Image: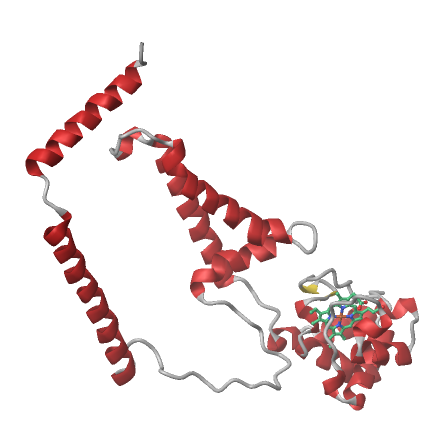
Amino acid sequence: MPSRRLEERRIAFQRYKEDVKRDGKPFYPYAMFHDTVMSLVVVCVIVGLAFVWHYTSLLGPSLAAKADPGTTSFVPRPDWYFYFLFYLLRIFKWPNSVILGTVGIPTILLILLLAIPFIDMRRERRLLRRPIAIVAAVLVALSMGVLTYKGATAKEALGAELLADVPNWVKAEKLPAQAVPGAKLFATSGCLNCHTYLGAGGSQLGAPDLSAEGSKNKGITFQIQHLKCPSCVNKGSPMPSFAAFGDANLRKLAIFLEASKGPK
Ligand code: HEC
């Protein structure tokens, strides 16, 4: 005795077959003609947009400013449609949950999406009769919207803003005058993309807070060596080399780091 639902599906499928027989049109040439026309429309729209972009400035400049390979203060930002992933990276902190946040969650959601036709086999199409699917879709759209907004408005560790913090650092840590040039360099060199210093910056890749780096008393020579080749000094360090700054600048940074004994 087949269940009632199975019976209903059989009847519905039978009705569908009869509908197709009575009103259906063969794929060739009807559907093929539709597809061809629609493809041409899409191609024409793309070509049209390319012309508008090339000959007017309605869609933005055709070329932005030249890339500067020597920059040390560039703050990379993704295109807007990746802001939600970008913000996920901020929520999930290195190293424990980053993989989960950036690869895990999107992959799980994609697999769920692929699995839906196999999970939900009902023929029901009306939106009001599919509460779970609708709630899930609304939740996904809502969370992506919120994450995109948060990503778009997130404050970056921008050099100019951080530079304004230097006087506060001098006061809080009682930094001597010769540490100030290093502090300014530190604020504008991207160090704070990974490190924190008195609450400024963001912690990435497990980089330590440097507010009290000087109290480790590692010495100027160590600091310069470490900045030149972090992984030579601290095995496996993911910190990039700053050897390109030149010895004079590295010395300034080292003096600042050694003078940072924590807030007093
Ligand atoms: C890409 C991320 C990243 C950037 C950018 C970065 N660091 Fe680091 N830094 C790390 C990590 C990770 C560690 C821990 C491993 C190590 O000690 O090398 C670290 C460690 C350090 C230490 C501690 C060394 C010790 O053994 O006490 C100092 C000091 C330091 N960084 C200074 C700087 C300065 C100054 C800059 C900017 C010129 C900078 N870092 C830029 C990731 C970064």
Q: Give the residue at x 68% y 78%.
A: 189
Residue 94, relative to residue 185: is it above or below? above
Q: Image quadrant of residue 186?
A: bottom right
148 vs 20, left or right, is: right
195 vs 150, left or right, is: right
Residue 32 appears in view: yes
Residue 174 appears in view: no
Residue 93, relative to residue 130: is it above or below? below
Residue 5 point in image, percent of width and height: 30, 18
For the residue pair 72 and 155, the one nearer the viewer reads as 72
For the residue pair 168 and 127, the one nearer the viewer reads as 127
Q: Give the residue at x 60% y 52%.
A: 91
Q: Image quadrant of residue 38?
A: bottom left
Residue 183 point in image, percent of width and height: 75, 78
Q: From this viewpoint, which residue is outermost toward the top?
A: 1
Q: Quadrant of ligand 1?
A: bottom right
Classify the position of the C terminus by image quarter.
bottom right
234 vs 48, left or right, is: right
Classify the position of the N terminus by image quarter.
top left
Residue 249 point in image, percent of width and height: 77, 87
- Image colouring: secondary structure
Q: Give the residue at x 58% y 51%.
A: 101
Residue 202 point in image, percent of width and height: 67, 63
Residue 180, relative to residue 78: is it above or below? below
101 vs 41, left or right, is: right
Counting the numbered discs, the total is 0
Q: From this viewpoint, which residue is outermost toward the left?
A: 22
